[in-house]
Image (spheres, grey):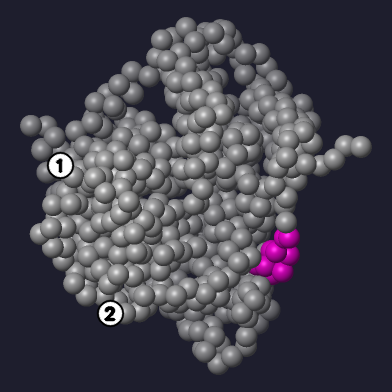
Amino acid sequence: MDIFANLWLGLSIAGTFYNLFYCLVGVFLGTAIGVLPGLGPVATIAMLLPITFGLPPESSLIMLAGIYYGAQYGGSTTAILVNLPGEPSSVVTALDGYQMARQGHAGRALSTAAIGSFIAGTLSTILIAAFAPALAAVALQFGPAEYFSLMVLGLIASIVMASGQLLHALGMILVGLLLGMVGTDVNSAVPRYTFGMTSVADGLNFVVIAMGVFGLGEIIANLENETDRSVMTKKVTGLMPTKEDWKRIIAPILRGTALGSVLGILPGGGAALASFGSYALEKKMSKHPEQFGKGAIEGVAGPESANNAGAQTSFIPMLTLGLPSNAVMALMIGAMIIQGIQPGPSVMTDQPELFWGLIASMWIGNLMLLVLNLPLIGLWVRMIAIPYHFLFPIIIVFCAIGVFSVNNNIFDVYGMAVFGVAGYIFRRLDAEPAPMLLAFILGPMMEEFLRRALLFSKGDPMVLVTRPVSAGLLLVAAVLLSAVLLPAIRRGRKVAFQDD
Amino acid sequence: MIRIRGEKDLGIGAIYLALGLVGFIVARSYSFGTAGRMGPGYFPTIISALLIIFGLVTIAKGFVRDGERIGTINWKGLTLVTLSVCAFGFLLETAGLAVALTALILISAAGSERFRLEMKPLIGLVAINIFCLAVFVGGLGLPLPIVGEWFK
């Protein structure tokens, strides 16, 4: 069996001492920032990117991936103990998890979340190993027209699934595309939108944008409403679920995994949407829907499995198509480019060690999280108790040093400050910045693919709709867009995101 | 009289319109080319034009449909956080890492409602300085100037 040979290759890469160490660092950091509300994986990965320059590509991606799925574990801890979502994807976990904690079952809620996440992580790793090669094989047949249409679909999907106003999000995509144009045009060597500044001749640095918008911008927004947090400081006991619990959680875990895996693959999907979907599903399936919101263990098991599965499978489009499905994946693509790897379907064939090593590391990382998290719960509880006004200056310190170290250029520090202000303004105006970052990364690629597609067709734009695969992708994008414009679904989105 | 009904729509629409206009005007100095041979101005012009349209539509929506108010802006946090980062940028090469870090932390922390100059946070300040020197300069070997040009 190919899949086992491949996974074995992956395990032999991820299992080296060096890579195990970086995997551990990644999941540990990921859990820590997941526990802390107000600091997410996007800002953290952006902060750590400069440090990954010196690492081999495998180790760097293994660590960064660990931060992302580690954050899913950490987010649930805060949700259960403080009734605050550490991450957006654990919003629904707080509903029943916190109630369980109040009834003295914090230990069972935490272990259910961890076990659910682990099972979901294991199954979705196998899923990636099984389906990614097939998808990459299809993608290798793609021409420039297909790639262009695929990216259009990716951008449209990212806003459909995102919260906030549709019109604003579409505008943010265009802003991102325009920002992506800054720098020297590869074909004509004409410097575009540089306004004479040599520092942006190679284009805007996406670490600067990501840290400004997601790091600083979020801090400024958070400073608006500083609230005290009350932590369940009571000792967490009774960590293992009972036999009765196992019977109740196993079906929700499997359903959550399935749902999360599917939603994660979709562009714009990922962890947050998966957990909302799973909670709604479990409530519908349950024989006691009235228990939901009052400490139903199914309401913890399902969404926690779903968000971890979604976090894992969102790597599939990134690894096979070179298409980021969310802001974290956009940063992962950036990390690959920094390492000199061109993301796309050829990664799997050209760099099998990197590809399978990363996938195998996800399973190892999940195992580490399961083993580590429960004993370390005391540490996390103490971390949650750190007040935000001590925390945020330290975050800014790491942002500032990180952004400077990318190119050892002071200009980038000022650039980050500018994007911090922009990020705050966008937030205040209900314009979500994540689609902008996606568009920024995809912009130059889209231009290049469009140019090639039109070159082959001698300037006929119909090539995008006469090639069947390209037409199909554009059709899906159009259907998605019009679906959101329908009032009924618009209301549905509002309900799904009202807790955001 | 025309009344503003959606402040947020109007605000973001104005930003889109402004960016679109700048993008469009600047892109006119790049050769547009033809569809078959896209010049450096081709894609930016299309994007900017779309951005202008979206800006106008969003602004129009702000006048026609009821939307949310912008509300009070956190000027203190916005100014101090931005200023702290700029101070870091200015001081890093002139005065060195330790001074730059101290300025960054003190200025940004003042952006919080809970800012107090007490013993505990000051110890924290020193600790962060030592941590950054030890980990980033000592451990990771990042080329951060420990002592700036002013003191040389």
The answer to whether residue A123 is visible is: yes
Q: Quick check: is A101 in the magenta stretch?
A: no
Does the residue at mark 1 contact the one at mark 2 (Cβ under 8 Å)? no
Dot label at residue A434: none
Dot label at residue A235: 2
Looking at the picture, which amino acid does disc 2 mark? Answer: Lys
For the residues tagged 1 and 2, is the chain the same? yes
Taking A81 as reference, is B4 left or right? right
Q: Position of residue B55 (x, y in %)?
A: 73, 34
Q: Position of residue A242 (x, y in %)?
A: 13, 63
Looking at the picture, which amino acid does disc 1 mark? Answer: Leu
Q: Position of residue A484 (x, y in %)?
A: 53, 29
Tag 2 subunit:
A
Q: Quadrant of residue B121?
A: bottom right
Q: Secondary structure at mark 2?
A: loop
Looking at the image, which residue is at 22% across and 47% down?
A253
Looking at the image, which residue is at 73% across and 35% down?
B65
10 Å neighbourhood of mark 2: few (<14), some, or many (≥20)? few
Q: Earlier in the sequence, mark 1 or mark 2?
A: 1
Looking at the image, which residue is at 35% across and 37% down?
A263
Q: Which residue is mark 1?
A: A7
Q: Which residues make up the magenta segment?
A: B72-81
Looking at the image, which residue is at 44% across and 24% down?
A150
Please name whichever residue, A497 or A30, is drawn nearer the observer in this view of the structure.
Answer: A497
10 Å neighbourhood of mark 1: few (<14), some, or many (≥20)? many
